[in-house]
Image (cartoon, rainbow, N blue to C red):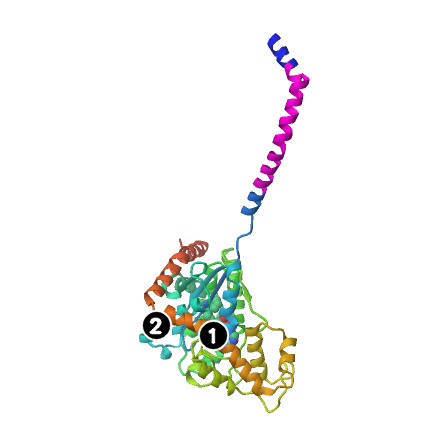
Amino acid sequence: MEQGGKFLELYKSPSIVLGRWVLLSLYLPWLLENLRFQTERWAMTQVEPKKRVFSGIQPTGKIHLGNYLGALKHWVENQSQFDNIFCIVDLHAITIPETVKPDEFKRKILEVAALFIACGIDSKQSAIFTQSHISAHAELTWLLNCVTPIGWIERMTQYKSKADRLTTVSAGLLDYPVLQAADILLYKADRVPVGEDQKQHVELTRDIAQRFHSLFGEVFVIPEPMIWSSGARIMGLDDPTIKMSKSLGEQRKGHSIGLTEPPETIRESILRAVTDSGNEVRFAHGSAGVRNLLEIFEVISGKTREEIESHFHGKGYNFLKREVADQVIAALQPIQDQYSRIMADPGHLQQILREGADRVRPMAEETLRRVKRSMGLV
Ligand code: TYM
C-alpha cells in the first residue's frame, strides 16, 4: 500500500511528467506515420478486381483488316485494364461442314494464335486458348439450348444471311449463337469487345442468361458488348455495301486486306477500291466506299475527323487511296515481322495454347457445375 503511494508520487513528479511528454512527442509522429502506412496498405488491397473480357475469332478464311480494326486492335490497346480471355473458336468454324478442310485446320488455329501475339496480345497477361480444348463449351451449349426459345435463334441476321446462301443448313449453324453464349457465360465475362456484326449475338447471350436466371436462379454475369464508334464495321473494298468478310476475302481478289498480305497486294487492293465519280473527301458527304477508306485512315492514324478532312481537302480520291495504303502498310509491317518470327516455332505456340486452356479450364468447370446444380443435375 505504502509502496503504491510512493510509486504514484514518483509518477507525478515534474521530471517524470516532462520525460513522458518528451517520449510521447518523439513517438507520436512515428505512430501517426505508421498508421497512415497501414491505412494505405489496407486501401490498396480493397481496389476493385479488374473486369473480365472475353472475345474470340474463328480460325477460318483470311483474317483481315476488319477483324483487326473492329476487334484485335482494341483487345491489345485495352489489355492492361482488364482480365482477358481470348479464344480461337474452332467449334464455330465447323458449322458449314462443306468448307472444313481437316488437313489445314491445325495450321489455321496456329496462324490465328500467332496473329494474336503478333498484334500485341501478351500470353502472360491474357489467356489464349482453343475452344475445343475445353469440353465445358459444348456441354454448357446443350444446357443453354434447352432454355433458348428456337424463335430467338431463327431471328439472328447472321444465321439468316448465311442460311440463305446454302442448300443444306446444319443444326450447328442455327445453334451457333448459343455456343457463343456458352463461351461468354462460362467465364463470367463482364465485357465482350467485338465488331458491330456480333452485337446481336451478345444481346442474345444476355437474353439467354436472364431467361436461365428466371427459371433456375442467378448463376451468370450479364455481359455487355464493347463496340467502338469507328472501325466496328469495315466494308469490302470491292463492294462497300457489304461487310469485309473472311470467306469473301479468300474468294475475291481485292475484297479484303489480309493481315499477312505483302505490301504490293495491299496497295493494289486499296488503289482499286470502289469509290464514286466525285472527288469530295468528307465523312458526311462521301459515298460508302470513300467513308470506308476515311474510317480506315481514322482508326489507324488516330487523328480526329476534322484533322483528316482538312488534310484531304481538295486532294481527290487518288491521294486519299495512296495515303490510306501507306498507313495500312506501315501499321501491318511490324505485325507481319512478328508473325513470321512466331510462326517459325509452332511448338511454342502449341504450348501457349495448352497453358492458356489450363489456366481458364477451372473457371469454366466451376460455372458448369453451378449451372448443373441449379438445374438439379448433380
Ligand atoms: P469472326 O471470327 O467473324 O470475327 C472476329 C472479330 O472481328 C470482328 N469483325 C469485324 N469488325 C469490323 N469490320 C468487319 N468487317 C469485321 N468482320 C469481323 C467481329 O465482330 C469479331 O469481333 N462469332 C464470332 C466469334 C465468337 C465470339 C465468341 C466473339 C465466338 N464466340 C464469344 C465474342 C465472344 C465471329 O464469328 O467472329
Picture coordinates of residue 224, whole percent (x, y): 55, 63
- Crowdedness of circle 2 by 10 Å Cα count: few (<14), some, many (20+)? some
Q: Is mark 1 on a helix, strand or loop?
A: helix
Q: Which residue is painted at 60% across and 38% down in the image?
A: 33
Residue 355 visible in the current orientation? yes
> Does the CB distance between marks 2 and 1 fall below 8 Å?
no
Residue at (58% x, 79% y) in the render: 294
- Between residue 190 and residue 325, name the one nearer to us: 325
User: Image quadrant for the N terminus?
Assistant: top right
Region of the chain picked out in magenta, as a range: 10-39
Q: Predominant secondary structure in magenta?
A: helix
Mark 2 CB near ligand 1 (8 Å cut): no
Q: Residue furthest bottom?
A: 277
The nearer-to-camera label among 2 and 1 is 1
Considering depth in this image, is 222 or 286 the residue closer to the camera?
286
Image quadrant assignment for residue 129: bottom left
Marking on residue 242:
none
Residue indicated by mark 2: 107
Mark 2 or mark 1: name the one nearer the start of the chain: 2
Classify residue 239 as left or right of residue 5. left
Q: Nearer the viewer, residue 219 or 31?
A: 31
Q: How many marks?
A: 2
Residue hosting label 1: 332
Q: Is residue 34 magenta?
A: yes
Question: Which residue is located at x 62 percent, y 30 percent?
Answer: 26
Mark 1: amino acid: Leu
Left or right: residue 50 versus residue 143 is: right
